[in-house]
């Protein structure tokens, strides 16, 4: 063998940079299923099925295309659960001149790979990860000398660089961001299109059976598995989103509705995050729909901003701030994650619905993650380590590089404001405005104090009071702190008492 190309489980694309100069006569590929990757946290069963099925389909596609693939299966007797012994064994058996790979997406994997050269005494070539639009170095250059790393300016820089939604040097529609148009709530009589569901083949059925057996104690269920598991299917899912959902994506981006977990979102994150789809092809497709007058600008810009702006920005922050970012806890939150995050056994209907969706689908959309689950964890003061463990476990799109900044930066403000200009803390009023969850809740969203009041209401004020020293100087919280100061003392004491009573009950494991 001349070169060995290592492909990581989230690089399942034949155009990956590690294969650019692959010689079918001389080179080989190594792909490994490692149990530790599926047991490092309590990964959702559907997420494990998804990842394993995608890997096995990718192997079969590569083999059909004439690549020689060394594929290590989870239950192979000689599976060492780490790359190094496999690389040593292949070197002993066949020898290779160079190890070639695309830069892994996680900090720990890159740290391991950086040691291979020394450990294996071969030349190791690490190529840029072309499953992202912006290089790590480019993000670092952009960040240099900036007081604040705001996503919006990064996004505008990339729009200009790649000439996306631009008319000469101006943004299409004369504004960069149509977010304020994208806050409509949904009525339950609006028809939501059916979601893409793949047909299960023998390979996926076999993986489902294995996961139900080997990972039976993991979170969630494999029932109704229907994610795309190869590139062809992922392209069909993309096509279906663009044709059936994109039009309404913007209007209802922040809406939530009981019994409708998928709404007008794209459900493409898991395909983007393991290489089945490429980010540029997704946003170009959406841009072309706008050019052909088939989709409104608020939807197309909103979708493009999520992928070109948020996704690339989040990755940039991860690499810029790791490894310290993982241990940040700016607000000293220290309450353990309550069991209802795992079993949905709570009287708070918004949380019950969001956790049930998560258990069933290994998916919840952004506003459920941010404004229900994340918001609750923030205002209740749950420890970031616990929150990160949960978010990394339960979603099929969860990988550390994207999950960690979203939790520590966006949801919990644990990074002290590197990502968000202010904490995304809110009372129940936001959830009431954007959903119908409060209609069927044991708590009253209009009440602020007492056993029957919505916990988000008193916890919100308690959060502001608790963090007054740290947050009152934040100019975006000026109004909130002015309102806090205006509250009569007795009211403040009652809010504090309601919060303490609720948190005590929750920490004792009683149903709240
Ligand atoms: P859409 O609403 O259709 O958005 C389109 C695409 O934009 C997504 O597919 C995704 O690739 C990208 N995108 C949108 N927002 C973000 C964002 N904030 N960060 C990165 N990409 C974004 N996303 C993950 O991919 N993996 C995670 O583990 C993850 N954890 C999250 C945890 C929290 C607390 C929060 C608040 C958000 C998290 N997100 C995560 C971001 C976002 O919620 C998901 O990308 C989105 O819900 C996926 O659903 P979708 O494909 O239908 O997205
Ligand atoms: Fe959630 Fe409060 Fe509404 Fe209940 S009343 S659904 S707890 S926001």
Image (cartoon, helix red, strand yellow):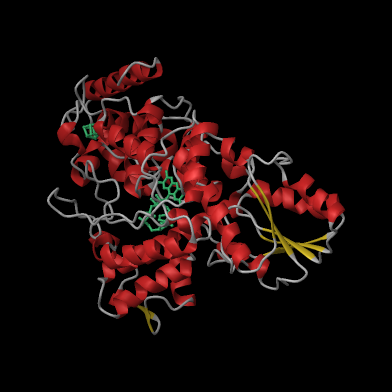
Residue 196 sits in which quadrant?
Answer: bottom left
Q: Residue at x 27, y 35 (%)?
A: 350
Measured as percent of width and height from the top left, residue 110 is found at 68, 52
User: Residue 20: percent from the left, percent from the top?
Assistant: 66, 72
In this view, 478 is above or below 457 = below
**In the orientation shown, which residue stands out farthest toward the bottom?**
168
Q: Residue at x 62, y 38 (%)?
A: 35
Residue at figure coordinates x 44%, y 79% from the top left:
163
With respect to residue 372, does 31 lie above or below?
below
Residue 112 visible in image: yes
Q: Position of residue 452 (x, y in %)?
A: 19, 22
Residue 361 appears left or right of 317: left
Q: Quadrant of residue 67?
A: bottom right
Q: Nearer the viewer, residue 188 or 89?
A: 89
Residue 132 % position (x, y): 54, 64
> Is residue 24 left or right of 329 when viewed as pictured?
right
Q: Could one spot residue 150 in this view of the protein?
A: no
Residue at 47% across, 45% down: 205
């Amino acid at each position: 063998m001349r070169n060995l190309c290592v492909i990581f489980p989230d690089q399942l694309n034949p155009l990956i940079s590690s294969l650019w100069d692959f010689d079918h006569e001389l080179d080989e590929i190594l792909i490994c299923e490692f149990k530790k990757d599926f047991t490092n946290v309590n990964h959702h069963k559907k997420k494990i099925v998804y990842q394993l099925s995608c890997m096995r389909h990718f192997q079969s596609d590569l083999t059909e295309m004439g690549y020689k693939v060394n594929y290590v299966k989870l239950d192979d007797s000689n599976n060492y659960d780490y790359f190094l012994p496999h690389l040593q064994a292949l070197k002993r058996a066949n020898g290779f001149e160079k190890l070639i790979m695309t830069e892994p997406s996680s900090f720990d994997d890159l740290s391991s790979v950086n040691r291979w050269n020394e450990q294996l005494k071969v030349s190791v070539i690490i190529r840029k990860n072309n499953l992202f639009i912006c290089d790590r170095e480019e993000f670092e250059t952009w960040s240099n000398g900036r007081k604040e790393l705001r996503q919006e300016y990064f996004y505008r820089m990339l729009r200009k660089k790649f000439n996306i939604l631009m008319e000469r040097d101006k943004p299409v529609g004369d504004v960069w961001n149509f977010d304020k148009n994208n806050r409509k709530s949904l009525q339950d009589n609006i028809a939501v299109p059916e979601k893409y569901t793949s047909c299960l083949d023998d390979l996926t059925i076999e993986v489902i059976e294995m996961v139900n057996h080997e990972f039976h104690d993991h979170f969630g269920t494999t029932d109704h598995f229907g994610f795309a598991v190869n590139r062809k299917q992922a392209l069909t899912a993309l096509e279906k989103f663009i044709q059936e959902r994109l039009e309404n994506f913007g209007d209802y981006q922040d809406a939530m509705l009981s019994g409708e977990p998928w709404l007008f979102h794209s459900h493409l994150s898991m395909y983007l995050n393991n290489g089945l789809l490429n980010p540029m092809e997704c946003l170009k497709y959406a841009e072309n729909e706008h050019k052909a007058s088939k989709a409104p600008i608020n939807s197309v810009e909103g979708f493009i901003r999520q992928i070109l702006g948020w996704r690339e920005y989040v990755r940039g922050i991860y690499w810029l701030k790791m490894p310290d970012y993982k241990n940040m806890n700016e607000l000293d939150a220290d309450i353990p994650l309550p069991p209802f995050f795992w079993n949905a056994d709570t009287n708070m209907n918004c949380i019950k619905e969001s956790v049930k969706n998560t258990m069933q689908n290994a998916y919840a959309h952004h506003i459920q993650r941010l404004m229900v689950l994340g918001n609750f964890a923030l205002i209740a003061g749950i420890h970031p380590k616990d929150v990160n463990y949960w978010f990394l476990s339960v979603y099929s799109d969860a990988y550390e590089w994207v999950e960690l900044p979203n939790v520590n930066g966006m949801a919990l403000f644990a990074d002290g404001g590197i990502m968000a200009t202010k904490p995304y803390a809110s009372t129940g009023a936001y959830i009431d405005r954007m959903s119908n969850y409060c209609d069927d809740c044991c708590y009253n969203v209009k009440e602020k104090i007492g056993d029957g009041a919505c916990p988000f209401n008193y916890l919100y004020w308690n959060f502001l009071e608790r963090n007054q020293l740290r947050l009152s100087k934040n100019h975006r919280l000026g109004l909130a702190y002015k309102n806090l100061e205006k509250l009569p003392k007795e009211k403040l004491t009652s809010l504090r008492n309601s919060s303490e009573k609720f948190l005590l009950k929750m920490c004792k494991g009683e149903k709240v």
